[in-house]
Image (cartoon, helix red, strand yellow):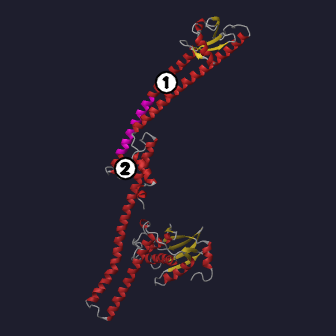
Amino acid sequence: MSTAAYAAPSRREDRGARFRAVAPCSLRRLAWGFLVIAAIGVLGADLYCVSTLSYRLRERTDRQIAQTHHARLEALRAGKGLYPDRDGSASLVTDGRGAVRLATGPPSLLAGLPTSADQLRERDRTGHPLPVAGRAARALVDRLPDGTYLVTARSTGADEATVRTLMGIETATSIPLIAVLALGALWTSRWAFVSLREMSRDARRIAEGSGAPSERIPVLTQPLRELRCAADTYNYLLRRIEEGSVRRRKEENRLCELVDAASHELRTPLTTITGYTQLALIRALDDPRRLDQAMEQVQKETRRLISLVDDMLLLARLGHGGMLEQRPVDLAQLCLQAVPRAQSSGAPRTLRCVVESFPHWVEGDRRWLEQAIDNLLANVLAHTPEDTSAVVRLGLDGERHVIDVIDDGPGIDESVRDRIFEPFFRAASAAPANPRAPRCPGRGLGLSVAAAVITAHGGSIGLEPTERGAWLRVSLPAAGRERVLDAAAPGALP
């Protein structure tokens, strides 16, 4: 790779460099900058109005002078002479040397008109009215065929007075307006600065831990809508940080409890295995019958240890998004097989399976779905008295398959209903008044493994309200029609 490739920054780096190159700007300086722009805008508007009015008035005066001039020019060419003044304009006729031959109009206006031969020749070449030197007037000059000049003029004093009046009005309004803008900018910037300082001080105090963990910046006291939005956003950020901190502490506590419970569960079989191993080492199991009993117990504890480790590995795998086998599975078959398997364990329970409508195909891992159903039934066997009856009901709820495991046992206490799906959590299995309630022999992983498997298959599991016993409901999405047809084909599934 060439050296130039290393020297060329990326587009993102260029954008970041541009943002870093921007110098910080004070809010007060920004407010005064807007004030200057507003003042320039007001003064520019005033100048534009004055210049526009002056131009329009001058244009109107020139048009009136041209109309009067052309009318008198035609009258002179027709030999009618100068008609009397009626519109306030003045006209005079001079010879080539500037001597006045005819004149009409106000004497004050006639006294200042150009009459020298050079002025007359110069103005004649322009063809449009020009201002009169030393007078508030404009004049138009044309040369007649006989060598004489017609000069027509009109006073602009009223127009100039109108422009001056407008300038006075604009000055009287613009200066107070700019002053009000300056005071408003100063007051607004100071008001905003005070609020920003208070917000920064509160935020710094909360960040440094001086305030309460649940303390927030007061939103309603902020004077500006933008500051309220900023305070509200900062409070939302604080709330999310606090929720994340609480969630992290809960997860840490849960992890500690999980490690403690797992260590305790692992220690029990390991202690048994270690004890029998030590007995074997010290030749304390010479009797073949005792040795067989010890090895049988070691094998039992080893199987328990392997089962515990498998369940923990499954929970870790599913917790990290581990993929399960995705094949069509007949839930009806799983439920119908799970009930006899649970009854074959020797527990004197009345278990029934009721399947409502057919078929019940879902897509997933048959082995783990079977394990989840077995765990639900094992939970009933482990936490209910011997005379308890239970039913496994499979049905449809819209587009989802529902498995209800309902028993008429003592039920689950309200205080632990939210924790029964946590790993290694075990509660009292029956009410104290029931002397035949068995002690909790499980490891506390059955329902947690079932919940993890059901969740990994896109389903849900939860407790439903009931007046007696416990009601666990599992909901799973139905498999696609094409997958069901493929699974129903002869020889498609074992």
Q: CA distance from mark 2 to mark 1?
A: 49 Å
Which quarter of the picture shows residue 488? Answer: bottom right
Q: Quadrant of residue 52?
A: top right
| Mark 1, residue position | 173
Mark 1 Cα-neighbour bin, 10 Å: few <14, some 14–19, many ≥20: few
Q: Residue at x 43, y 43 (%)?
A: 227
**Observer-nearest residue: 186 or 432?**
186
Indicate which disc, 2 or 1, sits on the residue closer to the N terminus: 1
Residue 192 location (% of width, % of height): 40, 38
Q: Position of residue 17 (x, y in %)?
A: 41, 50
Front position among marks 2 and 1: 1
Measured along the vertical axis of the image, is residue 192 above or below residue 64?
below
Looking at the picture, tell me which residue is in the foreground, 323 or 304: 323
Which span is picked out in magenta?
180-201
Q: State the predominant SS element of the stretch in magenta.
A: helix
Residue in the image at 57% along x and 9% along y: 112
Q: Is residue 206 left or right of residue 140?
A: left
Residue 83 position in % (x across, y down): 69, 8
- Residue 120 on the magenta segment: no
SS label for mark 1? helix
Image quarter where the N terminus lies is bottom left
Residue type at numbered disc 1: Thr
> Which residue is identified by label 2?
215
**Please, which residue is most extreme toward the right here?**
78
| Quadrant of the frame with the C terminus | bottom right
Q: Secondary structure at mark 2?
A: loop
Using the image, tell me which numbered label, if any, was put on residue 391.
Answer: none
